[in-house]
Amino acid sequence: MVKLTCILRRKPGMSPEEFHAYWRDVHGPLVAGTRSGSHVLRYEQHHRPLDDYGLGGSGDEGTYDGVTEQWFASMDEYRAHITEPDFATVWTDLPNFLDVERLAFVLTEAPVVVMDGPRH
């Protein structure tokens, strides 16, 4: 199992509400509807709660807006995902809602479980 985790910031000038709506209602379905997306076993969007904005001051510019996770059966499936011709459609959509200059991502293997449940 391989997981792609991306830490996201909305593009400058985009409100949190606009960002989350676009990511959920436009980008997510775009990924799911592509041949590239067919290599993804699971695609998760972890949205920052809207009521969390403003707590960090200065409009929270520069803070993170969410995390996405895409799960793949193997590195070969991940490579197949990014080499599909329609992957370019997904990639070129990113500047519509993300600060692509500050996009951070990492590929990881299956997790090492350190703790599972409460420890009493």
Image (cartoon, rainbow, N blue to C red):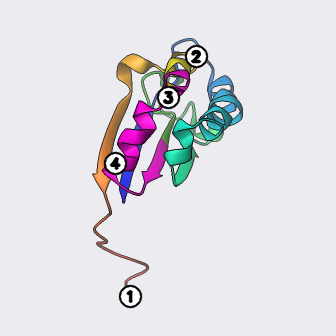
Whether the residues at callouts 1 and 2 have beta carbons within 8 Å, the answer is no
Q: CA distance from mark 2 to mark 4?
A: 29 Å
Query: 50 or 115, which lies in front?
Result: 115
Residue 87 location in percent, x, y? Answer: 50, 28
Q: Residues within 10 Å of mark 3 (few under 14, many from 20)?
A: some
Magenta-drawn segment: 68-90
Q: Nearer the viewer, mark 1 or mark 2?
A: 2
Q: CA distance from mark 3 to mark 4?
A: 15 Å
Name which residue type carries label 1.
His
Whether the residues at callouts 2 and 4 have beta carbons within 8 Å, the answer is no
Tell me what residue is drawn at x 68 percent, y 23 percent: 18
Q: Is residue 114 above or below residue 95?
A: below
Tag 3 residue: 87
Tell me what residue is drawn at x 41 percent, y 34 percent: 82
Q: Residues within 10 Å of mark 2 (few under 14, many from 20)?
A: some
In the image, 16: left or right of 80?
right
Whether the residues at callouts 1 and 3 have beta carbons within 8 Å, the answer is no
Tag 4 residue: 76
